[in-house]
Amino acid sequence: MHLEFERDIMEIQAQIDKLLDLASRKGIDVSNEVVVLQGKLRELKSQTYDNLSPIEQVQVARHPKRPYTLDYVERAFTDWIELHGDRSFRDDGAMVGGWARLRGRTVMIVGQQKGRNMKENLSRNFGMPHPEGYRKALRLMQQAEKFGRPVITFIDTIGAYPGIGAEERGIGQAIAFNLREMSRLRVPIVSAVLGEGMSGGALGIGVTDRILMLEHSIYSVISPEGCAAILWRSAEHREKAATALRLTAKDLFEQGVCDEIVPEPEGGAHTDWDLAAANVGDALDRVLGELSALSVDKLLEGRWAKYEAIGAWREA
């Protein structure tokens, strides 16, 4: 699968593949032609991905082949032990968590997980956590606090599940409770936005000391389609909404919401999962090293100051 703006990139890649196939079948030397085309391909990829519009960034963030939380866990961490359940209702497949090691450091991981096919998406609820998912997340964070271990959260959701059952079991309260408790968690806590971080569903595991965003990820109070439907009464205005929301990693870094942009492989994280995971692992290891050097009081003071500085207002 390729996106609309990748059409020219795919055409050059197809030419390269045809030449390599011809060389293997007929023993023809096409190395010079391949080198020229590969140079054009690199240049075109660089030009294309360095100049994506906000709505194109949204498309990359939602790419179905983009790596999800467990793909990063598998590649960047070791000794993964998944934990289940909120000790109240049930286990939520849309929210995963457990112990792991990052470069020798024991950490607690909590993250939203989507599925790759219909069967997986049904079990993962399309990456939209229920209240029990957020309660499980908080249970694991508090367990990490008990043992003095840092927490890493991976954000990748279109939002918390908006169904009747979720409302009956207190989805709003579960998220609000997480915001309060995360703000005073007495261990380092870092979040990384992997794909799309939408609405309170993302924020429910996003109150952290540092917010990292992958280069082509997005983070917003609402999706472009939802914003367009409210403001312009039609989702057809999603391109205008995406621009107005300023939801890209670059926009949020400039606004002081995002603390660091993690570079992605050329062409997006979906083109090279291993390199994407290595980049994320390097960034998390460095940031956790910095935070672990702080006292608990300094850690909490910095966390409060971070969120008090976000946004602007005027008193009349």
Image (cartoon, rainbow, N blue to C red):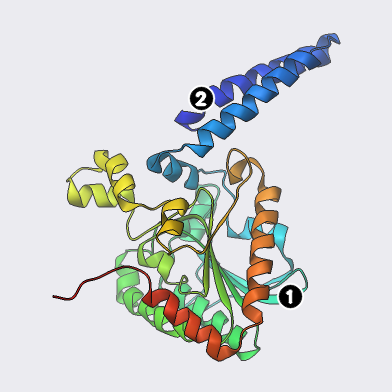
Quarter of the figure that contains the N terminus: top right
Label located before the other in sequence (1 or 2): 2
* Quadrant housing residue 17: top right
Q: Residue furthest right?
A: 27
Task: Tell me the residue that label 1 is attached to.
Answer: 105
> Which residue is situated farthest in the left direction here?
316
Q: Could you say whether the residue bearing mark 2 is in a helix, strand or loop?
A: helix
Amino acid type of the residue that numbered disc 2 sits on in the rendered structure: Arg
Q: Position of residue 138 (x, y in %)?
A: 50, 80
Residue 7, labelled with which disc?
2
Above or below residue 255? Residue 139 is below
Give SS at disc 1: strand
Rendered position, 63 above or below 279: above
Q: Is 251 in front, or is 315?
A: 315
Q: Gap between marks 1 and 2, in whole Å?
A: 43 Å
Give the class, few, some or many, for how many residues have Cα within 10 Å of label 2's Cα (few <14, many ≥20): few
Task: Give coordinates of residue 22: x percent, y percent.
Answer: 77, 12
Examine the rendering and report whether any part of residue 115 can be seen: yes
